[in-house]
């Protein structure tokens, strides 16, 4: 089993309810930011980090994503009967991702600055961690409200206000496979690993914007424009 991640799961199966009318006829990852679908911004991150295998999960209104992704050689993990949430969706995709640790990335954010997957890869230490979360200072988490869900002390993550989860991580596939339920959140896995002191964290110093709601589109475009990425 390999120790370093070389495969990426992009979460794209959600209903996108916070987007309102924008997702009435298409999945949220096909909503455009700066003239391009959100999923393409996620793929840019993956390609820049030279990830060998990319898997995208599908459930809500999958046809536009299938048409968009199939020509690009992206593997598709279909959650046909019901949505499996982040943990269940990742476990369902493990046969496509392969053994060992994998990257995961939410598809409803844009990034500036250092590549998030490169940051995670550089800090990954499998002897000391089973998951590595990329976190944000709430002051730099554009489009996000609240004080965050995680503390970070001496490199280890615990629950509590302090930092925002960015939607990017490395996690071992076998710890996800150990959950008995079919549909479950990655929070279930993180809580088990936090109790063992096996969840580490690092902080992204660049820009990031949550595009999970309509207002996030203009905020994300402003962030990209300020960074010269548009």
Image (spheres, rainbow, N blue to C red):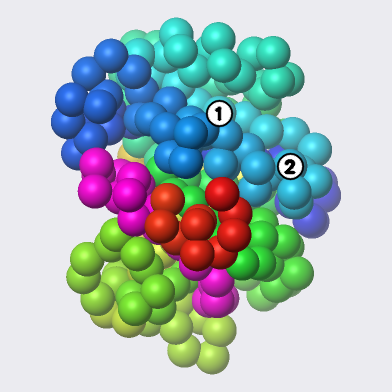
Q: Is residue 124 visible?
A: no
Q: Is residue 152 above or below residue 99?
A: below
Q: Is residue 163 above or below residue 226?
A: below
Judging by the rendered image, the residue that carries numbered circle 2 is 47
Closer to the chain start, of discs 1 and 2, is 2
Q: Position of residue 222 (x, y in %)?
A: 41, 57
Count how many numbered circles sit on residues in the image: 2
Extent of the magenta region: 202-220
CB atoms of marks 1 and 2 within 8 Å: no
Q: Residue at x 27, y 24 (%)?
A: 23
Q: Quadrant of residue 130?
A: bottom right
Q: Quadrant of residue 137?
A: bottom left
Q: Position of residue 99 (x, y in %)?
A: 73, 39
Other residues around mark 1 within 10 Å, as few (<14) / some (14–19) / many (≥20): many
Q: CA distance from mark 1 to mark 2?
A: 14 Å
Q: Position of residue 68 (x, y in %)?
A: 57, 16
Q: Residue at x 65, y 21 (%)?
A: 75
Q: Residue at x 64, y 13 (%)?
A: 70
Does 132 appear in magenta?
Answer: no
- Tag 1, which secondary structure? strand
Q: Is residue 172 left or right of residue 136?
A: right
Q: Which mark is residue 37?
A: none
Judging by the rendered image, the residue that carries numbered circle 1 is 56
């Amino acid at each position: 089993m390999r120790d370093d991640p070389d495969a990426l799961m992009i979460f794209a199966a959600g209903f996108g309810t916070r987007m309102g009318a924008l997702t009435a006829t298409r999945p949220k990852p096909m909503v455009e930011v700066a003239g391009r679908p959100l999923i393409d911004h996620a793929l840019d991150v993956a390609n820049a980090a030279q990830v060998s295998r990319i898997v995208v999960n599908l459930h809500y209104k999958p046809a536009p994503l299938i048409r968009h992704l199939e020509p690009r050689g992206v593997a598709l993990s279909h959650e046909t009967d019901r949505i499996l949430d982040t943990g269940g969706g990742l476990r369902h995709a493990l046969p496509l991702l392969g053994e060992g640790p994998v990257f995961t990335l939410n598809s409803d954010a844009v990034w500036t600055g250092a590549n998030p997957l490169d940051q995670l890869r550089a800090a990954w230490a499998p002897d000391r961690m089973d998951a590595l979360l990329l976190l944000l200072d709430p002051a730099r988490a554009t489009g996000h409200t609240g004080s965050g869900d995680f503390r970070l002390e001496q490199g280890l993550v615990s629950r509590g206000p302090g930092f925002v989860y960015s939607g990017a991580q490395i996690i071992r596939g076998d710890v996800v496979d150990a959950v008995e339920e079919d549909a479950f959140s990655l929070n279930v896995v993180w809580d088990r690993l936090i109790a063992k002191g096996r969840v580490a964290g690092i902080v992204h110093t660049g820009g990031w914007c949550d595009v999970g709601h309509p207002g996030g589109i203009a905020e994300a475009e402003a962030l990209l424009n300020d960074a010269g990425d548009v």
